[in-house]
Image: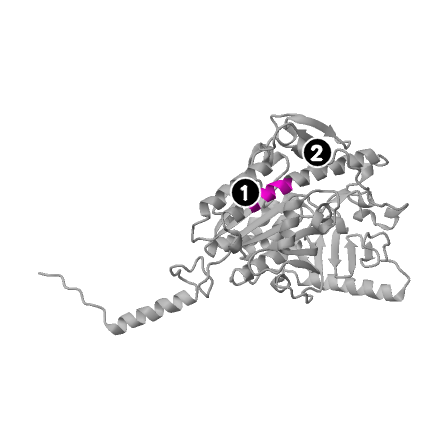
């Protein structure tokens, strides 16, 4: 006996079509081609995110440095929008990167130092909030990490070739770049007073993480992690040049983080240079609270040694120029593959870096050089120029989501600054928050207010005193006292509004 099947009625088909259409519009099911297209049907742009490690904006030509050679980054700045007042949220690698990638301020995301970097995944799960590349991966992007994007210990995780406290949900694929770092073949110099352990079979606890240790290599540098990162990034772009699926390529360079390693020709560029040391007036630190003083010349053993200081700056400059050359290779490939017309390029650093200002060095300070970062965005629809408006690392995620036609996740705490990328210079921020374990910074367009756990304060008029020599926190001038009070109140209101996902227990299914 034949098995006859009843054909669906026209009414049933109509109901099915309507039901599927409603689900598709609600985003509950995928429709063909939607992953890589905007609502208007245009292909979403690729994302090329490049982040340097321990790079101060003041070391780049496009930010006014007359000595350091950074043609690749300078040209990128000329083609895109350069932000002159962009700030990290915590001037330490792991915490800064967690805030950037989550678009959450550090007290909220609960990563308040390098040791807390492994908490990011748990805290984002507790918040029910995707990290930036994770969100793009779920939106149809191929997301790939090359090198250091979330935290990695330098040099330990680099010589070991391991992930560090990564965020696995962010990536379709990931690639580490193992390199010799302090063991590189060449001329070695130690400029600080660190006691180092030269154990080639160990990776951690050797003392190189903050030492001013420089290696001028006898090689072409291709064995170094940044060269490996550039070559891997180029191969990834080549493999995806003709695919419909858009890519989110995140490239993390470790230079100019110590050890300061670069090939000899980059050191040769600065061999005869005489770097100008920062102006440090007599008694400069007398009005800075003890909590505001981070790693300094005295602690490093270079106080009163201008030759040592200049040697550090020259080695740092060589490392910056070497990193810039890797940026050039990636951008050249982007153009050669004809991808530049549909790729948004973002360049930044995880935080700033002191090079002797107030006799301070490296990071972990709330002063301008430590918290201010280079930030450049270039690509289709972005107007070349310079923005003097406030911007922050937490703004990158919501801004790029908007540019890609994606809804901004509701728990992003940054500001969509895409109007600034189109030349609209209206102020979009009341202020920017940054912090350390010792205190908080509330940075407005004119002033910098710092408050420490002891209650001590710093306050600077950044127009009249951009080098922050004159702490006005205890001024007798009634107008200054009023403005200090306004900033104190603004900081308190800001902190009171922040949800604390870092204190929540992880709950619900993992993504």
Dot 2 surroundings within 10 Å: few (below 14), some, or many (20 or more)? Answer: many
Task: State the predominant SS element of the stretch in magenta.
Answer: helix
Residue 322 visible within the image = yes
- From what the image shows, is residue 257 above or below residue 367? above
Q: Is mark 2 on a helix, strand or loop?
A: helix
| Quarter of image, res 165 | top right
Residue 196 part of the magenta segment: no
For the point 44% across and 53% down, the residue is 245
Bounds of the magenta span? 323-332
Q: In this view, does 48 lie to the left or right of 84?
A: left
Q: Is residue 79 left or right of residue 242?
A: right
Residue 151 lies, in percent from the top left, at 61, 43
Residue 445 lies, in percent from the top left, at 75, 61
Which quadrant is the N terminus positioned in? bottom left
Residue under label 1: 146
| Earlier sequence position, callout 2 versus callout 1 | 1
Choose between 36 and 364: the one closer to the eye.
Answer: 36
| Quarter of image, res 272 | top right
- From what the image shows, is residue 68 above or below residue 84? above
Mark-to-mark CA distance, 2 and 1:
26 Å
Residue under label 2: 267
The image shows a total of numbered marks equal to: 2
Residue 437 visible within the image = no
**In this view, which residue lies farthest toward the left?**
1
**In this view, which residue lies farthest toward the bottom?**
11
């Amino acid at each position: 006996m034949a098995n006859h099947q009843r054909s669906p009625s026209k009414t049933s088909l109509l109901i099915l079509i309507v039901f599927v259409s409603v689900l598709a519009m609600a985003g509950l099911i995928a429709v063909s081609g939607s992953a890589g297209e905007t609502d208007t049907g245009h292909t979403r742009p690729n994302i090329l995110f490049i982040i340097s490690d321990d790079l101060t904006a003041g070391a780049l030509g496009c930010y006014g440095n007359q000595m350091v050679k950074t043609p690749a980054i300078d040209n990128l700045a000329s083609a895109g929008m350069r932000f002159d007042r962009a700030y990290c949220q915590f001037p330490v690698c792991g915490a800064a990167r967690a805030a950037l990638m989550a678009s959450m301020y550090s007290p909220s995301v609960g990563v308040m130092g390098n040791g807390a970097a492994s908490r990011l995944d748990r805290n984002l799960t507790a918040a029910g909030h995707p990290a930036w590349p994770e969100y793009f991966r779920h939106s149809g992007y191929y997301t790939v990490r090359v090198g250091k994007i979330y935290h990695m210990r330098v040099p330990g995780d680099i010589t070991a070739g391991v992930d560090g406290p990564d965020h696995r949900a962010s990536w379709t694929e990931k690639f580490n770049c193992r390199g010799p770092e302090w063991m590189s073949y060449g001329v070695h110099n130690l400029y600080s007073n660190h006691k180092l352990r030269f154990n080639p079979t160990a990776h951690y606890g050797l003392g190189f993480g903050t030492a001013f240790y420089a290696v001028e290599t006898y090689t072409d540098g291709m064995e170094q992690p940044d060269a490996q990162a550039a070559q891997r990034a180029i191969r990834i772009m080549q493999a995806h040049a003709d695919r419909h699926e858009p890519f989110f390529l995140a490239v993390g360079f470790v230079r100019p983080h110590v050890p300061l390693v670069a090939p000899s020709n980059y050191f040769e560029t600065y061999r005869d240079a005489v770097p100008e040391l920062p102006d440090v007036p007599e008694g400069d630190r007398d009005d800075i609270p003890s909590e505001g003083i981070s790693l300094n010349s005295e602690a490093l053993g270079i106080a009163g040694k201008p030759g040592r200081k200049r040697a550090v700056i020259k080695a740092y400059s060589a490392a910056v120029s070497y990193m810039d050359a890797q940026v050039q290779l990636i951008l050249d490939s982007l153009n050669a593959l004809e991808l530049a017309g549909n790729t948004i390029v973002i360049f930044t650093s995880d935080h700033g870096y002191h090079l002797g200002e107030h006799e301070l060095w490296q990071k972990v300070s709330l002063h301008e050089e430590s918290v201010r970062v280079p930030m450049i965005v270039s690509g289709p629809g972005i107007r070349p120029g310079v923005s003097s408006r406030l911007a922050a690392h937490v703004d990158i995620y919501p801004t790029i989501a908007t540019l890609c036609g994606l809804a901004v996740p509701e728990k992003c705490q940054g500001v969509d600054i895409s109007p600034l990328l189109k030349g609209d210079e209206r102020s979009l921020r009341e202020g920017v928050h940054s912090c350390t374990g010792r205190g908080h910074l509330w940075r407005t367009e004119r002033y910098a207010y710092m408050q420490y756990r002891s209650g001590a304060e710093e306050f600077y008029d950044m127009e009249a005193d951009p080098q922050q020599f004159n702490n006005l926190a205890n001024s007798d001038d009634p107008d200054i006292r009023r403005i200090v009070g306004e900033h104190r109140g603004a900081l308190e209101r800001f902190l009171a509004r922040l949800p604390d996902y870092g204190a929540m227990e992880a709950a619900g299914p993992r993504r």
